[in-house]
Image (cartoon, helix red, strand yellow):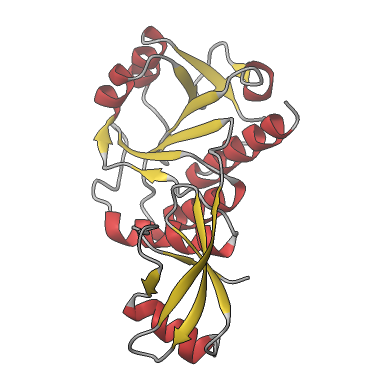
């Protein structure tokens, strides 16, 4: 069943009206007809099935016929990542991480950051599209851009992936027992030595994601996928 997104779903009102954009998609692309069923999620675990009553490219409405509540995932992954210089690379990561399953993304402003502004609305739409495509019901939380020092100081603990020398642990070995994991991923120029030191003093452990030197978005996705595989088996 095709999945659509709507920020707010009123379960007290069985009448449902689709947005202009999704009305066009239902009518022109999917060519749905009155009587067809589609699923809608609010990204907070709620899934409702809507039977279409009237459909046009300008306005489509229907009637709520079934409600399903999906529990939040038992394990949560939080990636704090320095936005890449090329927007497309960050957008790619957000899309793939949503498909794999991620709880929260925090854009970081670091000493070596080349991108210091993000388009939050555009990135949110990418998350929503990936949620619908992968048939999931919990939209990842996307935070506003925050400085590295402020973010680290707010956290109780976590992991920092970097290429600097020094003792590091393998993510797969130390994150298996945690229900929630926060991982810092640096910019193209990596975290500075001062940033790594600051993180370690604030209860962040240095980790390795393998012997290869990875791009920012690749490192973030490797971390997501590693945790996804670990959590699947515990």
Q: Position of residue 179 (x, y in %)?
A: 57, 23
Q: Position of residue 61 (x, y in %)?
A: 40, 80
Residue at screen point 44% across, 60% down = 128
Q: Say if residue 119 shows up in the picture.
A: no
Q: Position of residue 134 (x, y in %)?
A: 60, 59
Relative height, residue 216 to residue 179 (above, below): below
In the rendered image, which quarter contains the C terminus? top right
Q: Quadrant of residue 186?
A: top left
Q: Is residue 20 left or right of residue 37?
A: left
Identify which residue, 97 or 164, lies in the foreground: 97
* Numbered-mark total: 0
Residue at screen point 34% across, 75% down = 19
Q: Quadrant of residue 121?
A: bottom left
Identify which residue, 209 or 54, lies in the foreground: 54
Farthest residue, direction right: 233
Relative height, residue 201 to residue 152 (above, below): above
Relative height, residue 150 to residue 197 (above, below): below
Residue at screen point 32% across, 62% down = 122
Relative height, residue 130 to residue 76 (above, below): below
Q: Is residue 93 left or right of residue 186?
A: right
Q: Position of residue 104 (x, y in %)?
A: 43, 39
Q: Say if residue 233 shows up in the picture.
A: yes
Residue at screen point 64% across, 17% down = 177
In the rendered image, which quarter contains the N terminus? bottom right
């Amino acid at each position: 069943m095709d999945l659509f997104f709507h920020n707010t779903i009123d379960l007290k009102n069985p009448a449902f009206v689709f947005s202009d954009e999704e009305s066009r998609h239902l009518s022109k692309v999917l060519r749905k007809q009155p009587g067809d069923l589609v699923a809608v999620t609010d990204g907070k675990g709620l899934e409702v099935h809507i039977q279409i009553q009237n459909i046009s490219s300008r306005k489509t409405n229907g009637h709520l016929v079934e409600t399903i509540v999906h529990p939040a995932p038992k394990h949560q992954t939080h990636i704090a990542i320095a936005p890449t210089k090329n927007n497309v690379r960050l957008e790619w990561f957000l899309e793939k991480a949503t498909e794999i399953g991620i709880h929260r993304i925090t854009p970081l402003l670091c000493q070596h950051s080349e991108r210091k502004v993000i388009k939050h609305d555009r990135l949110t739409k990418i998350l929503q599209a990936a949620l619908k495509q992968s048939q999931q019901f919990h939209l990842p939380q996307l935070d506003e851009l925050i400085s590295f020092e402020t973010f680290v100081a707010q956290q109780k603990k976590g992991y920092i992936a970097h290429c600097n020398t020094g003792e590091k642990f393998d993510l797969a070995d130390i994150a298996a027992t945690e229900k929630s994991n926060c991982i810092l991923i640096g910019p193209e120029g990596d975290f500075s030595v001062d940033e790594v030191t600051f993180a370690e003093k604030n209860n962040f452990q240095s980790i390795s994601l393998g012997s290869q030197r990875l791009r920012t978005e690749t490192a973030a996705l490797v971390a997501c996928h590693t945790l996804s595989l670990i959590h699947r088996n515990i």
